[in-house]
């Protein structure tokens, strides 16, 4: 089975978090080497988180990250086939019209490989330390999403909202896709306002699930939001983030794993079977947060890709 025929796409989250690459901080040369190798072994996509400074609840010192959009532009120019995107871009960090402009430009650099992940943001610490407002995050997100969606789909927008205003805004020149890149919206199942926005504006929904049993109620919530919005649930693609503990990992070194307790630890065959099960339950794309997030992690998961493509 070829990459184009596998039951679902598989993405790799790049190590741009401080101390995240096997206990040390990745430099650009490290990120580039991992991105290129991930493309070579058959991953379908590359991802980075859009955070600025992350504080963990355990009280340890904050961790920084390389800025997501700068890194994505460099990765886009250095790869050929693989899709890429933020998982997910916080609309509160940038003016929404500028963010739409950035997305269209990155889509041009990549030759139409961008998946535009968007979210409302949630981490008050980084909002406060970088001087961004952290109140009414979903309300601000709804206005930003209307602007971004309108600009990417039509190339122009007039908007008069509570948080944002613009008149006669245009995207010129346009990127390689007339209606811009697909929009992926991150939202958890118990946030009805966010799920409504997914149903109204999203091409893809993104969330976390580490088993089919965990996925099923989440999928039902997403389906219900589509129905309430008058949308056929089958027209919304489903994507998942999964933290995977691979051979050679340093338990607890991954920042996502420290925030979640449901890390997957399994053999290559078991992981391939899990991905097949997700595909049978409507998931079209998974994003792997690997431990270790190194070249060794790429090589270790390449075995899973081989198993996934073998039947």
Image: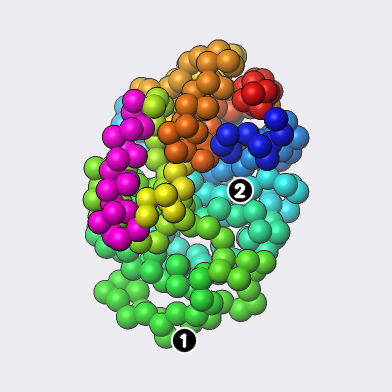
Q: Magenta residues, as a range?
A: 213-231
- Mark 1, residue position: 168
Query: What residue is rendered at 61% in x and 42% in y?
Result: 46
Q: Nearer the viewer, residue 23 or 84?
A: 84
Query: What is the x, y in percent for residue 113?
Result: 64, 54
Residue 128 visible in image: no
224 falls in the magenta region: yes
Q: Nearer the viewer, residue 133 or 294?
A: 294
Question: Which quarter of the rendered picture does the C terminus lie within?
Answer: top right
33 falls in the magenta region: no
State the predominant SS element of the stretch in magenta. Answer: helix
Query: What residue is rendered at 68% in x and 48% in y?
Result: 75
Residue 75 visible in image: yes
- Mark 2, residue position: 84
Left or right for 28, reference 198: right
Label 1 vs 2, first from the N-terminus: 2
């Amino acid at each position: 089975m070829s990459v184009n025929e596998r039951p679902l796409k598989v993405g790799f989250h790049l190590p741009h978090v401080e101390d995240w690459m096997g206990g040390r901080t990745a430099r650009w040369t490290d990120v580039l080497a991992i991105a290129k190798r991930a493309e070579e072994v058959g991953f379908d996509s590359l991802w980075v988180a859009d955070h600025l400074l992350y504080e963990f609840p355990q009280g340890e010192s904050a961790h920084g990250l390389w800025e997501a959009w700068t890194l994505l532009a460099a990765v886009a120019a250095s790869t050929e086939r693989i899709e890429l995107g933020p998982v997910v871009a916080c609309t509160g960090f940038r003016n929404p019209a500028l963010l739409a402009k950035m997305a269209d430009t990155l889509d041009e650099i990549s030759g139409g490989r961008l998946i535009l992940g968007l979210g409302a943001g949630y981490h008050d610490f980084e909002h406060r330390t970088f001087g961004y407002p952290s109140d009414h995050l979903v309300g601000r997100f709804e206005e930003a999403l209307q602007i971004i969606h309108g600009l990417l789909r039509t190339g122009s927008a007039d908007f008069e909202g509570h948080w944002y205003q613009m008149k006669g805004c245009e995207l010129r020149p346009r990127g390689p896709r007339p209606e811009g890149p697909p929009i992926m919206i991150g939202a958890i199942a118990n946030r009805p306002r966010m799920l409504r926005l997914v149903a109204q504006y999203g091409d893809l929904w993104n969330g976390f699930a580490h088993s089919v049993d965990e996925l099923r109620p989440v999928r039902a919530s997403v389906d219900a939001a589509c129905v309430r919005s008058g949308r056929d649930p089958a027209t919304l693609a489903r994507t998942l983030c999964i933290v995977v503990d691979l051979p050679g990992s340093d338990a607890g070194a991954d920042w996502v794993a420290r925030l979640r307790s449901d890390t997957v630890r399994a053999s290559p065959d078991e992981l391939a079977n899990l991905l097949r099960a997700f595909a049978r339950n409507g998931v079209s794309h998974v994003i792997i947060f690997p431990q270790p997030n190194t070249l060794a992690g790429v090589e270790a998961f390449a075995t899973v890709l081989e198993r996934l493509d073998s039947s």
